[in-house]
Amino acid sequence: MIDQPSIDGVSLEDKQGDALYRDQIGYLFAQSPFYRDKLRQAGFPDADAVGGLEAVARLPLTEKDELRASRSDDNPIGRHLACRPDEIARIFSTSGTTGAPSYIPLTRRDLDNWVTISASSYAASGIRAGERIVTSYNAGPFVAGAALAAFDRLGMCHIPVGTGQTERLMTAIRLLEPESVVVTPSYAMHLAEWARERGFDLAASSVRRVLVAGEPGGGEPAMRQKLEEAWGARVTEAMGIGDIAVSLWGECEHQAGMHFGGSGFVHVELIDPGSGEALPMADGARGELVYTHLQHRAAPLLRFRSRDHVEMWTSPCPCGRTTPRVRCIGRTDDMLIVRGVNVFPSAVREVVGTFSPAVSGHIQIRPRHAGVKQDPPLPVIVELSEQQPPEARLADSIAQRIRESLVVSAAITLVPHGTLPRSEYKSKLVDRSAVEPAQPGW
């Protein structure tokens, strides 16, 4: 591990982080009606009562629903807005899948900080100044567009294509010969199939790095192997969260988890997702990520629950970086509960993926009931590979391995290759189109 300069046994990085945090808390009390009320109701009358970063776990968590509830037609951003309207330089929005979209404002300084964080996270992948990179994210309205400026900051030749432009993207790869592409894992899989069906040898192309983000999957061993074989390239992950910063985490070429790229801008914690209690950050620790802004002005967030469930490592990486590393297990928003067992769809896909090459890697869970709680067995549709016929007891073998790995009973239905939908952005792993009405109390 690289030793950090310290004073009185406390690293300079920790001291600087504490100073930034105290300043941020003072700013919240002065500028954010939402947090001024929230902290006072929790027993913290002023910034001095909150204390330093070592005591952050005493403060209440922030839920996304709280922010939604604070919005109005007169204040569509919400009461956590902490700057003047004329200080806002950019407003992104969420997809609004639960109703009206959420708006995410940024000052010019906030936006510059986001680009700095994204550049740090993506640089871990090994991309270099002067190389060509093709991106498939749109510049708006979603926050992923903010990450695009990171490639300019890194001095790369950036070739933006956007979402849903498969033929244009493949033409750019063929004619412009980029070294890297940026896509979601689902889209990377779709592109591999698209190329194979048309006789385009992706593995022989110029692409040597595939940077995936936007959803879990790139770190699943089976999916990563399938993608690397199809592309003839190294696959690394990145991860962020729109309310805090895009591309907060980025994986290096050792592929041992995504490194935290937000040091000095964002403080990260690990909590027990059930109790909300803080968990020690150590190798093998599992929990939910919680974030606190340290240098944000437009709409800073304090102990914001990400709903991202991760496994964490804090031991040094062979690359020399000493920041924490994570791999995303899944999101609470996608989670199902089967007789008290939490089931992440991405975890089901990972187990099914171990049966490659008999399966294509595409799955779909089809719950019988509305809501989170489900009766066993959990219906899982598994698509077969086009390369070979399935073994006689493949469905039984998949169900048994899911039961052994995830402690849940599943009913496996095998379908021919090409049956399940492909995505040019993110996969829809749960299909609720045929659910039964929710049971009382669910």
Image (cartoon, rainbow, N blue to C red):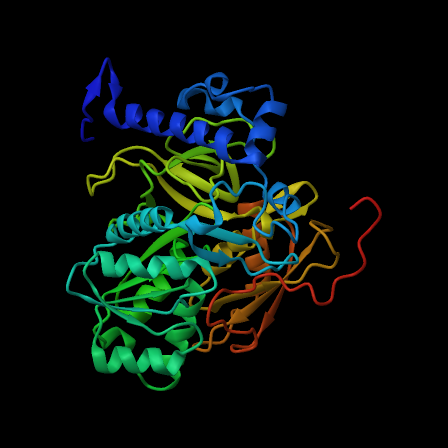
**With 319 as the anchor, is 18 left or right in this view?**
right
Name the spot of residue 279 as percent of width and height, x first: 48, 27
Number of marks present in the image shown = 0
Q: Relative to the observer, which residue lies in front, 225 or 50?
A: 50
Name the spot of residue 75 as percent of width and height, x first: 61, 49
Q: Relative to the observer, which residue lies in front, 429 or 105?
A: 105
Picture layout, residue 286 above or below residue 137: above
Name the spot of residue 63 as percent of width and height, x first: 59, 39
Q: Is residue 407 visible?
A: no
**With 290 as the anchor, is 198 left or right in this view?**
left
Q: Residue at x 28, y 79 (%)?
A: 172
**With 17 as the anchor, is 61 left or right in this view?**
right
Q: Relative to the observer, which residue lies in front, 303 or 218?
A: 303
Q: Is residue 159 visible?
A: yes
Picture layout, residue 405 above or below residue 227: above
Q: Residue at x 60, y 33 (%)?
A: 274
Q: Residue at x 50, y 27 (%)?
A: 278
Picture layout, residue 49 above or below residue 168: above
Q: Residue extending furthest bottom?
A: 198
**With 232 as the anchor, is 187 left or right in this view?**
right
Q: Residue extending furthest top?
A: 8
Q: Residue extending furthest left?
A: 130
Question: Residue 5 lies in what quarter of the image?
Answer: top left
Q: Relative to the observer, which residue lies in front, 176 or 59?
A: 59
Question: Residue 180 lies in what quarter of the image?
Answer: bottom left
Picture layout, residue 148 above or below residue 311: below
For the N terminus, the image quarter is top left
